[in-house]
């Protein structure tokens, strides 16, 4: 029985059920996987068993990430009904902290049915998916599966009073226009983490944000041959009850390229507890820095040595989008820093790592050989140490003079010398650790060459281009990426296009200072919300409306200032980074999601009640125009409760 309308929004949300939909549920692909995984605890604290993640059934990923379990009650009936509609829904738990309820969908859709579905997307929604793009086809197939699953959830008796479905990115959002066409009584939220068109344009053209207000979105989508993804994204934005994105800077894109003002902003956080090592974080940094020292010895010492106690490790990392990620600016600033360090003669060496993912044939055999010989030298030294220890102590107790050579057997002295000689190489240290598929045309490598950053002995700045994400299976490292980050001194991410940017946030969680930019969502958020950000180890480089050269000069000066810090200064900075990391925990930033879900609940409730001819919640009058309640007014109400990027903002638009 429906009540007379006295129920509050909070009461209604407490009786609602939330599905969260993405192609990256239990499927590690990119940043959305991190978003979903890291906020599980925050979601469960609000929704408990009324929360379920929905993703695609991918056997290889599911084998690692998913534990299938039988469903019961309402969910079991939904799964049974889904099968009748042509979708195999596997129910279980995602094997991450919190073990959230998860359903992975396998739509039973053949080529003919897929072709028909694509035709109807064009006929009914103007979505052109005819290009034969495999990624688009998979998005359509998954969208059909989600639509049928949601239809089952709306048809089966005994379910929640209200149901919500929160979709992420265009790949997971094809179901939204299908659900709205069928009038399913499910509140929809769509979050775009980066507009597809914006990412393409920014990767290839300059002055993106200055040109943005004057762009013809349809023309640009045609130019880059992404009409299908762009049309799906626009349909999801206009079809959702609540439309959100991750930052104000991406909101600018949404306004001009997708044609809808976001209802609010959902900044990305982390589960900071997962990274917390308590008071030991300085010793943990030291431990993993020693592992980077070992890499440095294997990579550089065959050619020449340097004082590791006066060597700083800086890095940049991310998808292979050299311009978007600011790799080009990093290299330009490093060339300037190299000259500055020579002029000031600080006695400091900088090793800068660019870590990304790029097609490569293999690790460079020379890098593997040097690392193998270094490991052999380490074993030789360990054997000598073990042999010497007992004899040295005995002779010391007997009052004899220190004569180490006499304690080492001739065999080990000879092997020690031979291994030392085997380590030496008459060449410059390698710039890249891998044999690239297209070495001659790689933009990062060519930029390094053009700047002359070739690891000359006399240059205080060295560069290591590592075109593979660091993992324990890599014989040059044998450690996790997070452990590599902990061992570094500074992360540098001066992006020119970055809707949010997890890399500097991960640095914070791991106790490492970082540099971001005002063209990154994270950088803009920090710059607007935390005026003291530079004091706790997050510098925001101004890039918007500035020339490349000016930004490079500023970045070089910042890097020089960091190189001037003594060990105590770096320790103090890391202490501040760790102290402020909790500001970005999901326990704080997750509140924005709750506001989005509350708004979606209010809007779908008003819509359903209007169809039934019932008064709005909290009123005794007849039904009003639900569009007014579910659009601008609701957005303003939410806006009054908010205060900054972390909150749901005011909506200027209504749902389509």
Image (cartoon, rainbow, N blue to C red):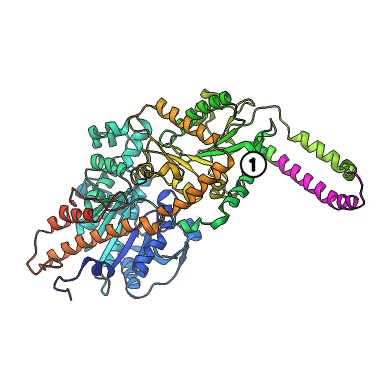
Q: Residue at x 56, y 53 (%)?
A: 281
x and y percentages locating residue 279 in the rendered image: 55, 56
| Apparent side of residue 417 relative to residue 237 in the rendered image (left or right) | right
- Side (left or right) of 146 relative to 479: left
Residue 615 vs residue 554, the one in the foreground: 554
Q: Secondary structure at mark 1?
A: helix
Against 15, residue 107 (above or below) is above
The outermost residue toward the left is 622
Image quadrant assignment for residue 241? bottom left
| Residue at the (7%, 67%) spot, across then down | 621
In this rendering, the answer to whether 449 lies above or below 420 is: above
- Residues 138 and 348: in front is 348
Instruction: Residue at 22% x, 46% y: name it.
Output: 261
Tell me where residue 628 appears, x and y as whole percent. 12, 55
Magenta segment range? Answer: 372-401
State the residue in front, 106 or 322. Answer: 322
387 part of magenta stretch: yes
Disc 1 target residue:
293
């Amino acid at each position: 029985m429906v009540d007379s309308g006295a129920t509050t929004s909070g009461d209604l949300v407490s009786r609602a059920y939330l599905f969260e939909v993405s192609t990256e549920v239990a499927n590690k692909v990119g940043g959305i996987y991190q978003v979903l995984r890291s906020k599980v605890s925050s979601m469960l604290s609000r929704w408990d068993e009324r929360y379920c993640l929905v993703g695609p059934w991918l056997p290889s990923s599911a084998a690692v990430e998913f534990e299938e379990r039988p469903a019961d009650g309402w969910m079991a009936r939904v799964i049974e009904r889904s099968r009748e509609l042509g979708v195999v829904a596997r129910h279980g738990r995602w094997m991450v902290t919190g073990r959230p309820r998860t359903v992975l969908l396998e739509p039973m859709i053949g080529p003919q049915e897929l072709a028909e579905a694509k035709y109807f997307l064009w006929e009914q929604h103007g979505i052109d998916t005819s290009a034969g793009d495999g990624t688009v086809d998979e998005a359509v197939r998954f969208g059909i599966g989600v639509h049928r699953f949601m239809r089952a959830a709306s048809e089966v008796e005994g379910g929640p009073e209200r149901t919500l479905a929160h979709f992420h990115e265009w790949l997971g959002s094809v179901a939204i226009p299908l659900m709205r066409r069928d009038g399913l009584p499910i509140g929809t939220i769509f979050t775009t983490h980066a507009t597809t068109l914006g990412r393409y344009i920014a990767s290839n053209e300059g002055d993106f944000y200055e040109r943005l207000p004057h762009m013809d979105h349809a023309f640009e989508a045609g130019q880059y041959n992404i009409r299908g993804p762009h049309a799906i994204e626009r349909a999801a934005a206009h079809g959702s009850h609540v439309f959100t994105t991750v930052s104000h800077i991406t909101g600018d894109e949404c306004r001009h390229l997708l044609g809808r003002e976001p209802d609010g902003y959902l900044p990305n956080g982390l589960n900071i507890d997962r990274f917390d090592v308590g008071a030991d974080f300085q010793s943990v940094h030291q431990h993993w820095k020693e592992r980077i020292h070992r890499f440095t010895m294997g990579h550089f010492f065959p050619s020449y040595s340097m004082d590791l106690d006066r060597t700083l490790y800086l890095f940049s990392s991310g998808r292979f989008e050299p311009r978007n990620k600011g790799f080009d600016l990093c290299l330009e600033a490093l060339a300037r820093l190299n000259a500055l360090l020579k002029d000031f003669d600080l006695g400091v060496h900088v090793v800068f790592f660019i870590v990304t993912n790029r097609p490569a044939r293999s690790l460079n055999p020379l890098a593997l050989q040097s690392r193998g010989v270094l490991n052999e030298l380490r074993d030789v030294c360990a054997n000598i140490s073990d042999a010497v220890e007992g004899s040295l102590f005995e002779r010391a107790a007997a009052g004899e003079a220190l004569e180490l050579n006499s304690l080492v057997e001739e065999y080990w002295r000879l092997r020690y010398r031979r291994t030392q000689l085997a380590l030496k190489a008459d060449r410059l240290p390698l710039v890249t650790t891998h044999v690239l598929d297209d070495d001659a045309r790689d933009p990062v490598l060519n930029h390094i060459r053009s700047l002359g950053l070739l690891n000359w002995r006399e240059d205080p700045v060295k560069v290591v281009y590592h075109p593979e994400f660091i993992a324990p299976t890599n014989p040059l490292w044998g450690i996790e990426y997070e452990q590599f980050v902990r061992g570094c001194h500074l992360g540098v991410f001066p992006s020119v296009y970055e809707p949010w940017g997890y890399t500097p946030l991960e640095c914070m969680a791991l106790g490492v200072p970082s540099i971001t930019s005002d063209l990154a969502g994270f950088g803009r958020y920090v710059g607007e919300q935390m005026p003291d950000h530079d004091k706790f180890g997050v510098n925001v480089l101004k890039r918007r409306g500035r020339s490349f050269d000016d930004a490079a000069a500023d970045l070089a000066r910042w890097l020089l200032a960091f190189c001037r810090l003594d060990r105590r200064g770096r320790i103090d900075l890391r202490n501040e980074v760790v102290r402020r990391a909790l500001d970005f925990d999901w326990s704080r930033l997750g509140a924005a999601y709750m506001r989005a879900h509350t708004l979606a609940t209010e809007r779908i409730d008003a819509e359903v009640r209007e169809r039934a001819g019932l008064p709005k919640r909290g009123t005794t009058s007849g039904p009003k125009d639900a569009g007014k309640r579910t659009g601008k007014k609701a957005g303003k109400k939410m806006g009054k409760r908010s205060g900054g990027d972390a909150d749901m903002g005011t909506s200027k638009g209504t749902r389509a």
